[in-house]
Image (cartoon, grey):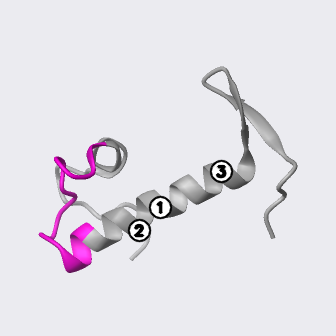
Amino acid sequence: MKDLDYTMNLRGQDTSAAAVYDALIQSINKVYDDVINGPGFIDQSTHAEEYHLFNNPFGVIDGPW
């Protein structure tokens, strides 16, 4: 369960943990959709922020498989 009252200072602004969690989930969903249902890679023109965060130019799996 999300702690809706917890906040942290990110880039000079108080941000709730719930907002960070929700943004991360949205980003992961965009990447998943691009890789699985889309062109097979993160679409840099459509999802520039996600491309910056998650692009792996070597195509190496990050983590256990």
Residue on which disc 1 sits: 26
Marks 3,2: beta carbons within 8 A: no
Alpha carbon distance from label 3 to label 2: 15 Å
Position of 43 with respect to 23 (left or right) is: left
Q: Which residue is mark 3?
A: 19
Farthest residue to the top: give it.
Answer: 12
Query: Residue 51 at x, y = what percent?
Result: 27, 48
Q: Position of residue 31 (x, y in %)?
A: 32, 63
Write down the region rendered in magenta: 34-48
The secondary element bearing badge 2 is classed as helix
Q: Residue furthest left?
A: 39
Q: Eyeballing the image, is 24 above or below 65?
A: above
Three-letter residue code for mark 3: Ala
Q: Residue at x 68, y 26 (%)?
A: 13
- Quadrant location of the C terminus in the rendered image: bottom left
Specify whether 45 is left or right of 52. Answer: left
Which numbered circle lies on residue 29? 2
Instruction: Decide: few, some or many residues near mark 1? Use Cα within 10 Å; few <14, some 14-19, many ≥20.
Output: few
Q: Which amino acid does the dot numbered 2 rest on?
A: Asn
Q: Is residue 46 magenta?
A: yes
Q: Quadrant of the N terminus?
A: bottom right
User: Judging from the image, what secondary structure is the residue with disc 3 in?
Assistant: helix
Observer-nearest residue: 65 or 6?
6
Find the residue positioned furthest to the right: 5
